[in-house]
Amino acid sequence: MSRAGRPAAALVAAAVTAAARGALDWQPPGGATTWTRTNHRGEPVSLLEGPAVVAGVLAGVLVGAGGLRATAATATAVVGAGAFGLVDDLREDPGTRAKGLRGHLGALARGQLTTGGLKVLGIGACALAAATLAPPAGGPAGRPVGRVVDTLASAALVAGTANLVNLLDLRPGRALKAVSLAAAPLVGTGGGVAACAVLGAASTAVEADLAETDMLGDSGANALGAALGTALVLGAPRPVRLAALVGVVGLTLVSERVSFTRVIERTPVLREIDAWGRRPAAPRAGVGTTP
């Protein structure tokens, strides 16, 4: 992989994200109301950031020229995660009781296919395809069984990271900060093109995200997470990939019972990072306000 491809991936991802967001704002498919949701403050926010980020990351990966198999793997993961996330964004039944990974898997076990369940299956399949295409940084395992196990672990890492980033997208800028911090150490590895594409797209999207006019939605968050997971598969040695998988699975399981937002709010360092660049929280009624 040419080192020149990494800055090109970042620059192109940033530029295409901005251009795509502007084009979508000019003529939103289905009208602006299709893409409008209510954020944690009860204010309107647009989901158009998500497809713009998907376009930016994909463009950055294609221009970065990280090798045919690596490019195909990352593109497959990003497009698949973005597309299935978009289906969940736009077609989710607000009346469904299935929430979280456990809820959607439970619905599937009962024979009920929710949009979230479809997303789980679709992203899982795309992650498996990406892991099959990708040449692992540590080299292929020596035996066929070892190669299968390595591929399945890599697929789980890609799909799990896509889901975890989406779990973080509950406050403005949180998911974008997380993926940027995680992608930065991967810039100099075999997954550097994917990491730089993530950084480039995030750098463009973060302004509107922090301003609370845009949000990633499932489409953008899943795509960024899938790109980050693929960067790990391409650039990290096997022990690091396995450790990352354990961390991702652990955090996902914890999220079913523990609120990330509450943990962040109670941890000073995390609270400061999380709040950086964001509008102050609205004061509670009767606290520092006049009636």
Image: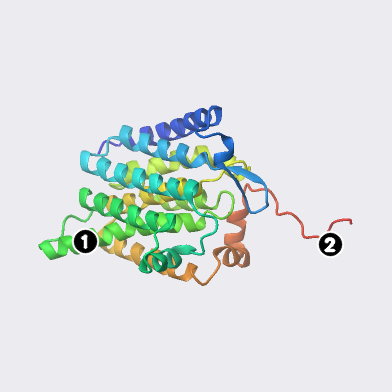
Which residue is labeled 1 in the image?
150
Q: Single out the residue that lies furthest toward the front.
A: 111
Q: Nearer the viewer, mark 1 or mark 2?
A: 2
* Distance from Cα at disc 1 to Cα at disc 2: 56 Å
Residue that appears at 34% across and 63% down: 245
Residue 218 vertical position relative to residue 286 in the rendered view, above or below = above
Q: Label 2: few (<14), some or many (≥20) within 10 Å?
A: few
> Which residue of the protein is positioned furthest toward the right in this rendering?
291
Q: Tell me which label, 1 or 2, sits earlier in the chain.
A: 1
Residue sitting at x 45%, y 30%: 15
- Residue type marked 1: Asp
In this rendered view, identify the residue nearer to me: 175 or 126.
126
Residue linked to disc 2 = 286
Label 1: few (<14), some or many (≥20) within 10 Å?
A: many
Q: Secondary structure at mark 1?
A: helix
Quadrant where the N terminus sits is top left
